[in-house]
Amino acid sequence: MDNHLQTALAPPLAIRAGERVQFGQLYGSSFGLLISAAARAHPGIVLVATPDTPNASRLEEELRFYNRGDDAIPILNFPDWETLPYDTFSPYQDIISERLATLYRLPQLERGILILPIATLMHRLAPRGYIEGGSLMLDVGDTLPLEAMRRRLEQNGYQCVSQVMEHGDFAVRGSLLDLYPMGSKSPYRIELFDDEVESIRTFDVESQRSEEQVAQIRLLPAREFPLNEEAVKHFRQAYREQFEGDPQKSVVYRDVSEGLAPPGIEYYLPLFFAQTATLFDYLPRQTWLFTLEGCDEAAEAFHAEYLERFAIAQYHLDHPPLPPQRLFLEVQELFAALKGYPRAQLQHFELHEVRHGVNFATARPPSLALEGRSSDPSAALRRFVGEFTGRILFSAESAGRREALLETLRGCDIHPTAVESWHEFIGGTAKIAVTVAPLESGLLLREPAIAVIAESQLYGEQVMQRRRRRSRNRQRDPDAVVRNLAELQLGAPVVHEDHGVGRYLGLQKLTLGEEETEFLTLEYAGGDKLYVPVVSLHLISRYTGAAPESTPLHKLGSGQWEKAKRKASEKIRDVAAELLEIYARREARQGHSYPIDHTQYAAFAAGFPFALSSLAFAL
């Protein structure tokens, strides 16, 4: 990182437990930049508490952008269960897997950044001994009695299945053990020679094909609580001590007694252990805390929420609730625990009293929205680029979005240099550059003068939402969808989902009944016009085929576009049928096994995801 930039953002690190500082005037994505700089300077763990899960996700994306480079610090996420207190359904296995992996790594991690919502920090957890005792390192050459391993996996909550598909699954086929450990990015195929581990390979859950060979794997428990015989016995005794009446009337008690994990069992976690822990018990001594603005209020709100839901849950006789103090930290307990660490509070607004804080040289990122209905849509952007004396970095969410952004910028006579990362931009000399980064907010530094312009500043929306909420039409290429009128250039070819390729002629106001409405005007072959309401912009995609001036247009009402789509669908079904035949032949070969996911191929045959713009060009 540039020395001048590093000096401008270097935070004054608190070094004594209980010491607290405030950082203000942090606008845009400067939270991520500041925390990244602090993590590089701090010889330990940096824990960042956010008001909620969306803020945690947004900050994680910022950190992964500003923290890239040769000296990047590991980033860990401890996700919330994403269930409400006392809910009667359980979190997704992927969430549990990530939580277990973080709990395992934390005590032995020398440096890193841990992000989590403040409410998640208030949950009581399994003790460290359970996580460490339920983990296993397996190396090639180790002795592994298969039946004993099967029993151990089942006792630790793993499920024996015919085909491994998700975290917590395992399957035994002859001398092969397929296993998807919690906390692992990939499942493993362990090949045994008698009781010796001969090889360990990753494999793909869709095709079931073996991939890369590895030397070792790490196994974590399948859940945040045990379900072995001893744990079930402890649960039954603790349940009878906690609740009056006949325990057999409770579905929770009956299921656990049979070794099952009923939905919502996570809110009975303390009954499996003699004593619970909190995340603070997993943190190394060299830990520094960051809390974002709004965390104190969010902690108070969560405290009120779990008290309210406890009052309601008391009427569920088959799911009697544990007292809140057994499951959660109270607000006073949380703040008392926070005082045991050096702590920094981050906020956007400027600090007026800076004796115990620091204001930074950042400003609010400017609004540079491209006004599609204006006669000069890019006026604000061109004015900013012309007047800004520093360096500018544009960010696009994906490679496809970057190409769309470059097209828009070329129309504004702005020609940025492509860079791979923030650190490449800082280390380079380009006055204006563009990169791929899913930032929701830009950045404006005063000293040194640097501006990061995110897509949301140009298109007036949070483009990150597309990654969390797919388009209603799953057969369209999300990078080709037009999200803002300013993305369209006059005369550019576009693709209408129902009518095919036409040419964009601009906006036109038409009166329907007594209301005046804006329409996009599209020209088709033969000079035919199609008027599309602005509210139906989601039906329009960019054309990504031949040169714009030589694009072949479709004829309205000719059926040409319907025939093209039908022809493409037939080709897709033919390809799917060929693939099924190939896999069927492989399955029939002596000594070979290539499991087929017929559901997956049926879905493939029903409609392979494709971009309408590419389809128009191909056919």
Image: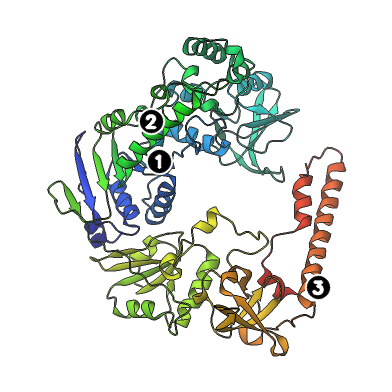
Q: Nearer the viewer, residue 49 or 251?
A: 251
Query: Which residue has dot 1 on it?
Result: 116
* N-terminal-most mark, 1 or 3: 1
Q: Quadrant of residue 389?
A: bottom left
Picture disc at residue 279: 2
State how far apart marks 2 and 1 are (Cα).
11 Å
Query: Tag 2: residue type?
Result: Leu
Query: Tag 3: residue type?
Result: Lys
Residue, x 50% and y 39% (percent of image)? Answer: 82
Q: Position of residue 404 (x, y in %)?
A: 53, 72
Q: Position of residue 317 (x, y in %)?
A: 56, 20
Q: Nearer the viewer, residue 276 or 499?
A: 499
581 to 172, vertically: above or below:
below
Answer left or right for 70 relative to 355. right
- Neighbourhood count class around disc 3 (C-alpha, 10 Å): few under 14, some 14–19, many 20 upward: few
Residue, x 51% and y 14% (percent of image)? Answer: 239
Find numbered disc 2 in the image and state the secondary structure of the residue it sits on: helix
State how far apart marks 1 and 3 are (Cα).
51 Å
